[in-house]
Amino acid sequence: MHIYDIHTHLLPGIDDGAQDWDETMHMVYQAYEDGTTDIAITHHVLSDQDYELENEIIEKYEELKERVAGAKLSLNFHLGAEIFYQHGIKLDHRISTYNDNKKYFLVEFPMQGIPRYVDDQFFEFIIDKITPVLAHPERNLGIINKPQRAFEFVQRGVMLQLNAGSITGDFGEEVRQMAERLLDARLIHFVGSDGHNTRRRPIVMKEAYRRIVERCGEQTADVLFNQNPAKAMQGLEIRILEPLPVPPSKAIKGFGFFKKFGF
């Protein structure tokens, strides 16, 4: 079975991910030894200026595939970006959508809340048959304080990506509980490592897979780690289960939350 990791910062010297080729290759070996078969490379695009790095990203992406082939590691790679949401977001670059398929793109919100007017812009994408994949909603304070917003996003056609480290407790107990509640409400559609390095944020998925099998069953785990991401990488339609409302949670206020749990 394939295990897809749809959210990584793997290439060297692009953002706050791998700093050099040694670290990149150590991350690759970690992923391979952990059982990952497919890795999507999704470096930060915080503003349109970051697209100035697009050619460098593509060149290093091709070099990475050559290095991995030379090491005789059986890994497949996919190219995308993690786009920081801003009003008027454009998807007209090769790295904007997964494998340039013009169908699925990874987008993140500021950790402290949900941007204004995002519902309207997401709706425009969905009308155009382009699906936003919201990165790590379980770590977003706006969703933690009002998980009904996650339900609303999914009802309208947005898909959600859980961080592997969230379900294993790497971001604290509140985030882990939020991850479980989103899973139970059928609001999670993908899992990604959000891997940045070999230490605190490695590209590992096996433990998260095990936890989700225990909680949701093998079939759900296969959908989240294999079936859905395989279709997303190819730009194919993904049919999801009807989402369930999430009961309200106790609000977590202030930036002490971020400091406590390492945001």
Image (tube, grey):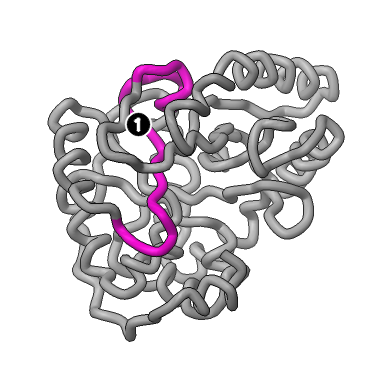
Q: Position of residue 130 (x, y in %)?
A: 25, 29
Label 1: which residue? 104
Q: Amino acid at mark 1?
A: Tyr
Disc 1 secondary structure class: strand
Residue sitting at 49 percent across and 47 percent down?
225
Residue sitting at 59 percent across and 34 percent down?
38
Q: Position of residue 195 (x, y in %)?
A: 64, 48
Based on the picture, tell me whether residue 252 belongs to the magenta stretch. no
Left or right of 29 on screen, residue 156: left
- From the viewer's perspective, is residue 261 above or below residue 133? below
Residue 208: quarter of image = bottom right
Location of the C terminus (image quadrant): bottom right
Q: Position of residue 235 (x, y in %)?
A: 35, 25
Q: Position of residue 72 (x, y in %)?
A: 82, 23
Left or right of 171 on screen, residue 225: left
Residue sitting at 47 percent across and 78 percent down?
174
- From the viewer's perspective, is residue 11 above or below residue 6? above
Q: Nearer the viewer, residue 94 or 34?
A: 94
Based on the picture, tell me whether residue 109 belongs to the magenta stretch. yes
Left or right of 113 on screen, residue 9: right
Residue sitting at 62 percent across and 52 percent down?
205
Residue 244: quarter of image = bottom left
Span colored in magenta: 92-114
The count of marks equals 1
Location of the N terminus (image quadrant): top right
Q: Nearer the viewer, residue 62 or 56?
A: 56
- Prevailing SS of the magenta stretch: loop
